[in-house]
Amino acid sequence: MSETPVGIVGFSGYSGAELVSLLSRHPHVEPVLLEHREGGDRPRPLGYEGPRRLPCSADSIRSAGLAAVFLATPPEVSMDLAGPMLDAGAKIIDLSGAFRLGTAENYQRWYKQPHTRPELLAEAVYGLPEFCRSRIAAARLVSNPGCYPTAANLAIKPLIEAGAIAREFGIVCDAKSGVSGAGRKASLKTSFCEVTENFSAYSILDHRHVPEVLRTSGLDENEFSFTAQLIPIHRGILETIYFRASDTIASAEDLMEIYRSRYAAEHFVRIYASGQVPDLQAVAHTNFCDIGFKYDHQTRRAVVVSVIDNLGKGAAGQAIQNMNLALGYVETAGLL
C-alpha cells in the first residue's frame, strides 16, 4: 500500500519537529517538509536525506497530492496559509490558536490582534477528539487544541456534564509547563539563565488559553481561575485542579464512576485509582492524558491532577490523532 503524503509547515519548531519524528514512523503516511522560510534547521550528518522537501505553496500541494497539511506556525502565519491550502485540496490541521475561539471578537480580545480570515472560523472544528470526534472526521479545517486546555478540559468537562462540581464556589486550575511550550523562538523569559533554578507565573488572569477551557467545558469566566507557570524542564504539563463537589457526590467512587464511564472507550485517557495521581514521567513522549484525584467527603473538597506531554497530547500527538480521524485511518495509528 502506498503512503499518503502529508505536509508540515514549521517543521523546525518544537511541535513541528515532533510531528516529523512521529509521522516518519506512521504506517500510512509520508511526511513532506514544506519550506516556508529559510534557516532554522539543525545541522545534519553527511549522507542524511530525511523527508523530501517542497516549497510551501498551493502548487506544491496540488502537484504532490498532499492529503493534509499541518501548520505548526504562529497564528498570523496560519491565517495567511490556511485559505490557499484548503483551495488546493488539502485538509488542514492547525496547531496555532488562529481558529480555536469561534469568533473574530474572541480572538481580538485574547490575542490582542485582529483576525485576518474570519470567514474560516465558522467551518473550523475544534480538535479535541474525545469530545469532537464525529465533527473532526468530516472537517476540512481542524483547530488543534492548546496544551493547557487539553489537560484542563479532559479533567473538567466530564464533571461539568455530570453536575459533579458546585460551580458557585469556582474552579481553580494551577498549571505548570515545561519550556518547550513557549516555542523555539528566542526570548529573554525562556533563555537558559532565566529558566534554570527558577519557577515563574505568567499571563495571570488573561492567558489566551482560558477561553478554550470556557468554550469547551461550558464554564463562565467568573467560575474559572487559571494560572500558568513555567518550570525548568523541557516538556510536560501538570495541572492541579481544585473545586468543591456538588451534593450529588457522596464518595470518591462517585467521581471515579464519572471518569470511568466517560473514558471507558478512549485509548488516550488513563484514570488512576482514587487517591493516586500521575506525574510527568508517566506521560513523557506519549499521547496520553493521565488523570488522578483525591476527594474529602466531609468538606466536599476535591483535587484532580491532569498530566500530558505538551509536545505529544498537547500538540503533535493530538494533531496526528486528528489527522487519522480526518483521513479515515485508525485513530491510534502511529501513536501507540
Image: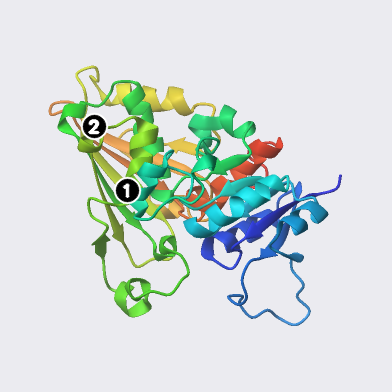
Query: Residue, x 13% and y 29% (percent of image)?
Result: 299
In this view, the residue in front, 184 or 329, is 184
Q: Position of residue 329 (x, y in %)?
A: 71, 37
Q: Position of residue 68 (x, y in %)?
A: 69, 47
Q: Quadrant of residue 221?
A: top left
Q: Using residue 195 as the reference point, say whether residue 323 is left or right of it.
A: right
Q: Using residue 179 as the reference point, say whether residue 222 is left or right of it.
A: left
As drawn, the residue found furthest toward the top would be: 248
Mark 2 sits on what residue?
Answer: 295
As drawn, the residue found furthest toward the right would be: 1
Query: Residue, x 32% and y 26% (percent of image)?
Result: 160
The span from disc 2 to disc 1 (Cα, nearest Å) is 36 Å
As drawn, the residue found furthest toward the left would be: 299
Q: Quadrant of residue 10?
A: bottom right
Q: Position of residue 150 (x, y in %)?
A: 43, 43
Disc number for residue 55: none
Q: Are marks 2 and 1 in contact (CB under 8 Å)?
A: no
Instruction: Name the amino acid type tagged 2.
Output: Tyr
Query: Residue, x 68% and y 36% (percent of image)?
Result: 330
Q: Is residue 235 something that shows in the picture?
A: yes
Mark 1 sits on what residue?
Answer: 109
